[in-house]
Image: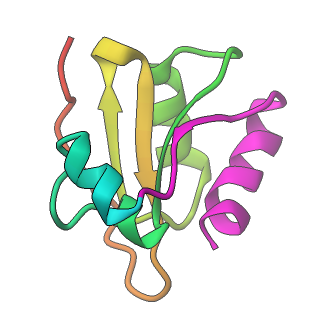
Amino acid sequence: MLALRVLEPLRKHVGAPIHVSSGYRSQRLNDAIGGAPTSQHIRGEAVDIWTGAMDAAELHSLIQSVIPEWDQLYLHRGQNFVHVSYRVGNNRKQVLPDKGT
């Protein structure tokens, strides 16, 4: 559903590939990289993305303006990617603080 509701519509708006640097993570991998114990990556509900067509701040803004359904969104300015999640049911449209420089 994440690909159908968020990634594919976003790709159409950007007009360029959306690159996924992190998607589904097993619990073991999530623990090894210091991911949050309740990470949506563990359930396949979250991705960290970037595109060569725009910087992460522009991508972050675009998601808010053109994608009608998403759960959580944050900009990771230091590594130039955006974290976006989608869950079936109640999407909170929660913009989390920028993860730093």
Q: What is the x, y in percent for residue 8? A: 76, 53
The residue shown at (31%, 64%) is: 27
- Hey, which quadrant is residue 71 in on the image? bottom left
Q: What is the x, y in percent for residue 48? A: 46, 40
- Colouring of the image: rainbow
Q: Is residue 66 left or right of residue 32?
A: right
User: Residue 2 colored magenta?
Assistant: yes
Against 70, is 52 above or below?
A: above
The residue shown at (51%, 50%) is: 23
The magenta span reads: 1-25
Against 36, is 97 above or below?
A: above
41 or 62: nearer the eye?
Answer: 41
Q: Is residue 79 left or right of residue 13?
A: left
Q: What is the x, y in percent for residue 10? A: 69, 46
The residue shown at (19%, 67%) is: 38
Against 76, is 88 above or below?
A: below
The residue shown at (21%, 11%) is: 101
